[in-house]
Image: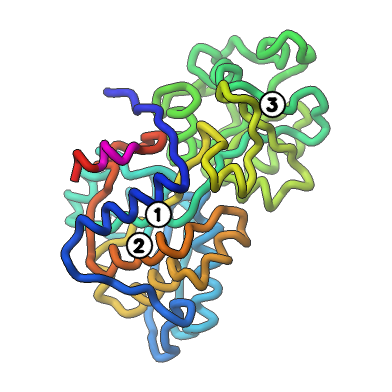
Amino acid sequence: MMLPQIKYLSLASVSALVLLVSACGDGNQGTAPTGGGAAGSDISGKVLVDGSSTVFPISEAMAEEFQKANPNVRVTVGSSGTGGGFKKFCNNETDITGASRPIKPSEVELCKKGNVEYIEIPAALDGLSVVVNPKNDFVECLTVQELKTMWEPAAQGKISNWNQIRPSFPNQRLGLYGAGTDSGTYDYFTAAIVGKEGDSRGDYTASEDDNVLVQGVSTDTNGLGFFGYAYYEQNKDKLKVLSIDNGQGCVKPSPETIADGSYQPLNRPEFIYLKKSALSRPEVKAFVDFYIAKENANLVSQVGYVALPDNILEAIQARIDKGTTGSVFEGEGSTIGVKLEDLLKKE
């Protein structure tokens, strides 16, 4: 299995990526919805959403606001993790699935078997956040190498105390909390930090539910965990977020460092994947239009992520209107960022 290439993602790269793919579709030009993407109240039906726990807060917020404008539509949002969500999605059990990494080759094949064509839609930017208990007074910043020392497979059963990470740290137990193996966050973190997707020690407290990880770190004075930035934002009173040094100095995740791409290598895009056949149903089309309408980008910010700029949201709307299917990552999974010249070769 080829190791994922470790590249870096900036907001400009995401912008160029979406615009490039839109330009490679057919010649019809889509337009962004007006009025916040809200549909008429005469629309009825059900929309089934599942997938990433990281994307869950965005989908939940969108569903709540959409249903206010469309009371006859029921939007159900689940949180099975990125991997679990793709299994349901490719088995035709859901209309939309959230993902905190691009679709994997195995999932591409699963969707082919299920005759599911999908539209890949960037939904927001995130900074995967490393947190400790607020009573921890000895660490403010960790290097990527120190994180690797904690999480690589060779650490299992051997790296158990903080002073094994850095001699100046106290000789105290190291409690680790992280995403479960069915999570896109797990895939992305291991690719970015360990160097191979899905490769880590197994002796840590794992969960696809980020709230479980928040609870674990907040009650363990020696704890350290990782999850999407929104979960830190929502729980900053009981967590302490660390800066990460990727060789260019310590950088803390924030809306500013996530937007400008300086929080590396844990900057990442969040996605929703839409089943193309579901677009024929007015309730699904209306919900997706609402989800990416620029008038509703404030909901992304409110839950703790970084919204995409207006011109990119308009380009995404054009992709949906044209029904452009497939992944611009070609099903590579957790590729950490992308180079535009690579995209040009692929298209």
Q: Which label's residue is closer to the chain start, 1 or 3?
A: 1
- The picture places residue 110, in percent across and down from the top left corner, at 23, 46
Query: Relative to residue 31, is residue 219 drawn left or right?
Result: right
Q: Quadrant of the N terminus?
A: top left
Up the image or down, 328 lies above or below 188; here it is below
Query: At numbered mark 2, what does the secondary structure look like: helix, strand or loop?
Result: helix
Front in this rendered view, residue 319 or 20: 20
The answer, for residue 183, to whether it is visible in the render is: no
Task: Quickly name the residue at label 1.
Answer: 122
Q: Tag 1: residue type?
A: Pro
- The picture places residue 246, in percent across and down from the top left corner, at 56, 24
Q: Is residue 211 magenta?
A: no
Question: Which residue is rendered at x = 71% and y = 29% of the image?
Answer: 223
Magenta segment, which residues?
339-343
Query: Relative to residue 295, is residue 17 drawn left or right?
Result: left
Q: How far, Cα to Cα, is label 1 from label 3? A: 30 Å
- The picture places residue 226, in percent across and down from the top left corner, at 60, 36
Q: Tag 2: residue type?
A: Ile
Q: Is residue 342 magenta?
A: yes
Task: Quickly name the residue at label 2.
Answer: 316
The answer, for residue 83, to whether it is visible in the render is: yes
Question: Which residue is rendered at x = 53% and y = 60% of the image?
Answer: 58
Task: Quickly name the residue at label 3.
Answer: 141
Q: Which label's residue is closer to the chain start, 3 or 2?
A: 3
Magenta residues: mostly which secondary structure? helix
Up the image or down, 14 lies above or below 206; here it is below
Asked whether disc 1 touches disc 3, contact meaning CB atoms under 8 Å apart, the reply is no
Give the quarter of the image for residue 205: top right
Q: How far, Cα to Cα, is label 2 from label 1? A: 8 Å
Bin the neighbour count of mark 1 within 10 Å (Cα to Cα): few under 14, some 14-19, many 20 and up. many
Q: Tag 3: residue type?
A: Cys
